[in-house]
Amino acid sequence: MLRPVASWCHRHRRVVVLLWIAALVGITVAGNTIGSRYDPGSQISGTESQQAAALLKARFSAKSGDEGQIVFTARAGVADPTVTARMEQLFAQVADLPGVRSVTSPYSAEGIGQTSKDGKVAFANVQFDRKAVDVPKSTIARAEVLAAKTAGDGLVVELGGQVFEGEMSPGPAELIGITAAILILLVAFGSLLAMGLPIVMAMFGIGIGLGLVAFTSHAVTTPDITVQLASMIGIGVGIDYALFIVTRYRQSLGEGMDPHAATVRAADTAGRAVLFAGGTVVISILGLFVMGVDFVKGLAVGTSLTVAVVMAASITLLPALLGFVGHKIDRFSIRRTPTTETTGRRSMWFRWSRVVQHHPWVSAAAGLLVLLVLAIPTLSMRLAFPDAGSRPSDDTTRRAYDLVTDGFGVGFNGPLVLAAQFPEGADTSALTELSQRLKGTPGVAFAGPAVTSPSGDAAVIRVIPTSAPQSVETEDLVHTLRGDVIPAVVDGTGIDVKVGGITATSIDVSERMAARLPWFIGAVLFLSFLLLMAVFRSLLVPLKAVIMNLLSIGAAYGLVVAVFEWGWFSDIIGIDKTGPIAPFIPMMMFAILFGLSMDYEVFLLSRVREEYDRTHDNATAVADGLAATARVITAAALIMVTVFASFVLGDNTAVKLFGVGLAFAIFIDATVVRMVLVPATMELLGDRNWWFPGWLDRIVPRLHVEAITDVDEELAQLEREPAAT
């Protein structure tokens, strides 16, 4: 299929390029016109917190929207007449903004308890009439302007809550990542023109992909982190895929092929591997749908769409661009003599493979020890959603968080909401008893009275923990309330009480995802085993690959825990507060890294298998395969590492975490795994690497990532087709 596609795109290159330009412009313009609707979407159906949220929405319609805070402090004290006048004016102005239902001032009777004991800090609750994602951006911007105008002369005003959490800038990440990729491609190809092809192709792919992400945000719950994650993955895989194809194209030119034949050959070999690897990435990421979390579905759709567009560009746009380049691929060379894509037994990679193969036990043991030591911190990984205290220190919601912590205690940043339901006219004295019992519960800083709904069949109790929203102590408190305190009071009374609120929701989502993570990882590894078994007709090769993938990803998890939970080197990447790992990150990392590692696995082992089938000499096949692929694998991995690592320069902690984890995992996979463990273990196993029972050979379908027939005849036929005018 790829041969005629590549041939057609090469011959009709002007049409193909114009179609891609039209797609890029059209989708970009449409995306800017329609806009996006990014939503954190932290609810999971069937959890207790979701049931509490549904009850509150049905019985307390006035509080059905999200809530924000105006937090302020003053040197003269918040009760100073001047401060009071300025803040009351601000509250009135904010209350008139579109989407705001009410503002509860700390100076009002309803706002008792919203001023700190020392009188230095206070906050007003801003009740919106809709969810945070639907609050007009103009309202948020206007509130920020009003707060800034009110502040000054010893008065500090900050805005807290999810509504005011703006999109965090990725910083110069994309620019630095692309610049680094350009430099690496220049070294690899030695030509400005050859370097430019992967960059242009990747830019088309992610430009269209991000436009599609904006579209899907209207149909699927999609967090704003999807944009940066899709950019990161799109740039990395786009340049990598083009690198593989351009490398094979240059190699074919060096063998004497004309540009058309070289393009078709590159598409039918490297392009086939790109389709296999990219398809694996898409399938594994879409496997996240089994997690049953709305915002994870949005992440999966957005990221996989970008990868799919990049794949399509690799097998259509790139052949068209190669048609324009032809034999001029090495024009504007930065070297005196053009480089050629040749490999051989005089290369350093062949010599390196022989060194490893001469000491296989030592090499295998050393590589395994490195991975196991790096993976040790994974055992202490804690999954939980970071709170606003993990945001950058220059963010208004972070400063509001810190002010509330200083004035009231850290627990005020994550209140729990107990939603009770009962028959109308029922005896609700148990709720009064529950409120009193809560006040004496360890871990509870404050428990308010039960407030009955207008319908008379529901009530809410506000509970303030003594600990931070993301802390283990708060998680334990939620379980204590659900398992001990609440049942002991309301069982047998006909009153049903659910623990909800943003903090409880985060805990429920984290626990659901943590419970499903092992099943997801197991399913991905099993799929990996089956795919590699079908490709290489072996049992031990895919088994080793699965184990090594698991170890390399475990090493990446370990580094993530050491940096983001333990604080190692955190200052270097701009993390001023450590915390738990967001629960969606390990599964997204695993899905992405599974596909990327399959890319390198197939690229290396398919060449090894090709040499083994030709010589039936396992040791020589491993060395020759490594020599033939190591240079391009190293260049591809180096591009991935620099692109991913550049994202630590942004503000978003989750994006930083992705950048560190993905960059380190690719580095480990391309060095310790591909260059040490693979040749060492294949040397130890010898011909047993390729053992495959006959009965399995008959029932397992064959998958081919390289051309399985001689392409010369088909190339000759394609050459006889009329050329495009």
Image: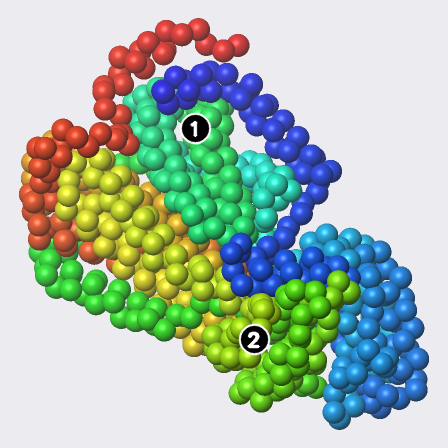
Number of numbered callouts drawn: 2
**x and y percentages locating residue 560 in the rendered image:** 41, 67
At 42% from the left and 37% from the top, the residue drawn is: 242
Q: Which mark is residue 595?
A: none
**Distance of mark 1 from mark 2, alpha carbons?**
64 Å
Residue sitting at 66 percent across and 64 percent down? 423
In the figure, 78 relative to 306: above or below? below
Q: Is residue 551 above or below residue 226?
A: below
462 lies left or right of 444: right
Q: For mark 2, give the secondary structure.
A: helix
In this rendered view, identify the residue nearer to me: 247 or 148.
148
Can residue 132 be seen here? The reply is: no
- Residue 307 visible in the shown view: yes
The x, y position of residue 691, in whole percent, is: 9, 40
Q: Nearer the viewer, residue 232 or 74?
A: 74
Instruction: Give residue 490's mark.
Output: 2
Dot 1 corresponds to which residue? Answer: 315
